[in-house]
Amino acid sequence: MSDLTYQMLALVAYMVAMLGIGAWAYRRTSNLDDYMLGGRDLGPMVSALSAGASDMSGWLLMGLPGAIYATGLMEGWIAVGLTVGAWLNWKVVAPRLRTYTEVSGDSITVPSFLENRLKDSTRLLRMASGAVILVFFTFYVSSGMVAGGVFFESSFNTDYHTGMLVVAAVVVAYTLFGGFLAVSYTDFVQGAIMLLALILVPVVGVFVTGGPAETVDSIRAVDPSRLSMLEGATALGVISAAAWGLGYFGQPHIIVRFMALRTAGEAASARRIGIGWMLLSLFGAVGTALVGIAYYQQNPDQKLNDPEAVFIVLGQILFHPLIAGIMLAAVLAAIMSTISSQLLVTSSALVEDLYKAVFKNDASDRQLVLFGRLAVLGIAVVAAFLAWPKTGTVLDLVAYAWAGFGASFGPIILLALWWRKLTAPGAIAGLVVGAVTVVVWGNIEALSSQMYEIVPGFVLNTIVAVAVSLVTYKENPAIDAEFDEAIRLLDAEGTREKAARV
């Protein structure tokens, strides 16, 4: 068999497995709670890897290695910021959000939680939150589709649009039918494949380039500054890169995994698993980029046309075609895991947070699940339309959407969980200011080139939300009772966990 045949066999097997998980999940999905949150029955292993896989996306295997390959370890500050942010997210947000969402109206989406938590009878907060999710996630999904098109273009020399449509079709199929369970369990499998691939490529690559010392020498021969995280960096540049970590607190497709945990106590186990997976994966991505620099320095007759394809091309060079096919499946896994999570959260925003808020709340579970599936299809079509021209890199598209969510929802989620005086007007004002700041700042080159837009958006959101809340705060016994009950249940869960360990 030809190399291409081996690789296609591996990819077809992977796609069939994902569709199989979708079919299994379809039989276990009977109502909107199952479709959107899996009945709050995820264990720590599945929660951790599904959160990691949906978080990292094609950025982990394409965007980050491509950026480091092109400019060096200075781009590694993004990985540092993300690791710290992810750890804090699991530590500070996960257990409290899991408890509070159940106490406050058994909320199954981020906007519904904010509405229930702040007792907003106007529904404006829920609709504003749903609109922000709809706008930024449509861009986010389109970045995944761009990555899918680039993947097939780089791997098989196929047309960009053909590859984009193949990826979109498979993801939409298992997400549309299987809902949250399909997304979570496919993400779990995809996370495992990604980790294996990210370990194998740099480890084998170091041997091919002559060992660690020879690899480092080859990188230095290209440019010694590629091995430095500080040379050529500015204070604002480092802050901007590390500030990616701020985005974690506001990413709906990640924090929804916290809401789906079986218990708040399992967040600690999930945190250890998730951060371990993340550290290994990020080291693998960085190692892949550095090995790529060394390999092409040693083989000047070969040329890498697209830096974001360095992982894909090295996998094809270093391994037997069948193993290379598994490496390609890892890239596809990274892309598809994020698209599916984002499609589902955007669907929930349309159905749970916009349709039910604006029109009516008397639709049956069967009708709501159908609406959710139609929303997945509609969003995918719009995202494909945006991705069709292939404008911008994967990293650029992801950075914009990541900043949008981090600056819009991050401060509001933290304040809602930890500050009882947050009010609905304060949350709405902060949410809007954060989103608008990202849009304006991110589209002014003189500003965005100096500082990543998430920083001013996050800061201004926090200031406005606190200021407006202090002006509009009125004591509400129901809010105080829920706040106290969430803390009580969290403390009780912590006591049970400690007793179980003893």
Image (tube, rainbow, N blue to C red):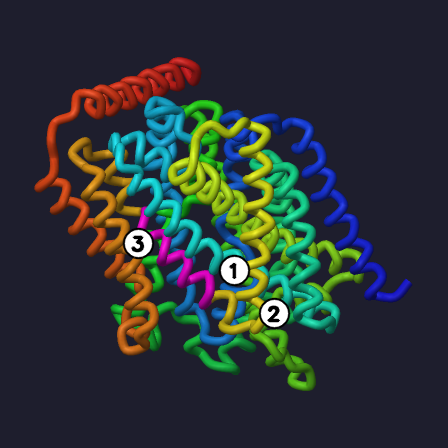
The three-letter code of the residue at mark 3 reads: Ala
Query: Horizontal and vertical percent for residue 403?
Result: 36, 58
Q: Which mark is residue 40?
A: none
Task: Name the residue located 63 percent from the left edge and 52 percent from the top edge.
Answer: 333
Residue 429: in sight, yes or no?
yes
Residue 159 covered by magenta stretch: no
The three-letter code of the residue at mark 2 reads: Val
Query: Horizontal and vertical percent for residue 152?
Result: 69, 66
Where disc 3 sits, the SS reads helix
Which residue in the protein does label 1 denote? 59
Where disc 1 sits, the SS reads helix
The residue range painted magenta reads: 396-409
Left or right position of 427 against 329: left
In the depicted view, which residue is nearer to us: 44 or 480? 480
Residue 407 covered by magenta stretch: yes
Which residue in the protein does label 3 denote? 407
Vertical comparison of 364 with 205: above or below: above
